[in-house]
Amino acid sequence: MAERFNIYAGPPITRVLEQAGRDNKSGRMNDIAARYDAIITHELARLRLTEKDWCAIVDANNGAVLGDDVGWRSTWANVMDSPELADKWDVNPIALANRLRVLPLPAQAAVTEIVERFWSSPKLNTMSAGQLLGEIGAVFTLTEEATDVAP
């Protein structure tokens, strides 16, 4: 069911609404959100990250400011700056960060989306990190050996 609410239309929203030149702003915003959701879902299915990789990524980005234009493309840097992830999640943070750093832009957006969903989830403290990651859309590679990120 549709929900009616007010939002602040910052520069990105204003720009895409003006570019379309149509009166139905709600319809335009829904179209954009549907496309964004499809892109994120597609990219998540292509990423080859294990459950441990995802846990390390969200852990390294706990409290990170990802909303600005630079922040959401820098999840890899937070992994790189977190050597403690090696022991905690049994991952190589340098190798993981390097794999994340070279992802195409849509895949970087998908990683950021999972980080934001994870830390804002009302279920954050009610299940394991892996369970929550699966519930919010992260897709896990089944084997620890297959950790290359798909091109």
Image (cartoon, helix red, strand yellow):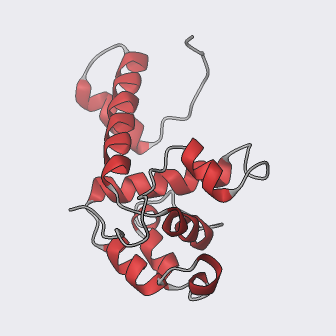
Residue at the right extreme of this rendering:
126
In this view, 36 is above or below 74: above
Between residue 17 and residue 77, name the one nearer to us: 77
On the rendered structure, is 148 left or right of 30?
A: left
Residue 139 horizontal/vertical position (percent): 44, 50
The quadrant in which the N terminus is found is: top right
Residue occupying the point 41% across, 78% down? 97
* Residue displayed at 41% across by 43% down: 11
Residue 36 coordinates in the image, percent (x, y) = 36, 38
x, y percentage for residue 32?
35, 30
Residue 64 sits in which quadrant?
A: bottom right
Residue 110, above or below 40: below
85 vs 17, left or right, is right
Which quadrant of the figure has residue 109?
bottom left
Name the spot of residue 74 as percent of width and height, x first: 43, 70
Quadrant into which the C terminus falls = bottom left
Q: Nearer the viewer, residue 98 or 77?
A: 98
Q: Is residue 28 above or below residue 96?
A: above
Taking depth in this image into account, of 101 and 141 the one nearest to the observer is 141
The residue sitting at the left extreme is: 151
Q: Residue furthest bottom?
A: 83
Count all numbered tags in the image, as a single digit: 0
Which residue does the image show at 62% across and 69% down from the upper left?
59
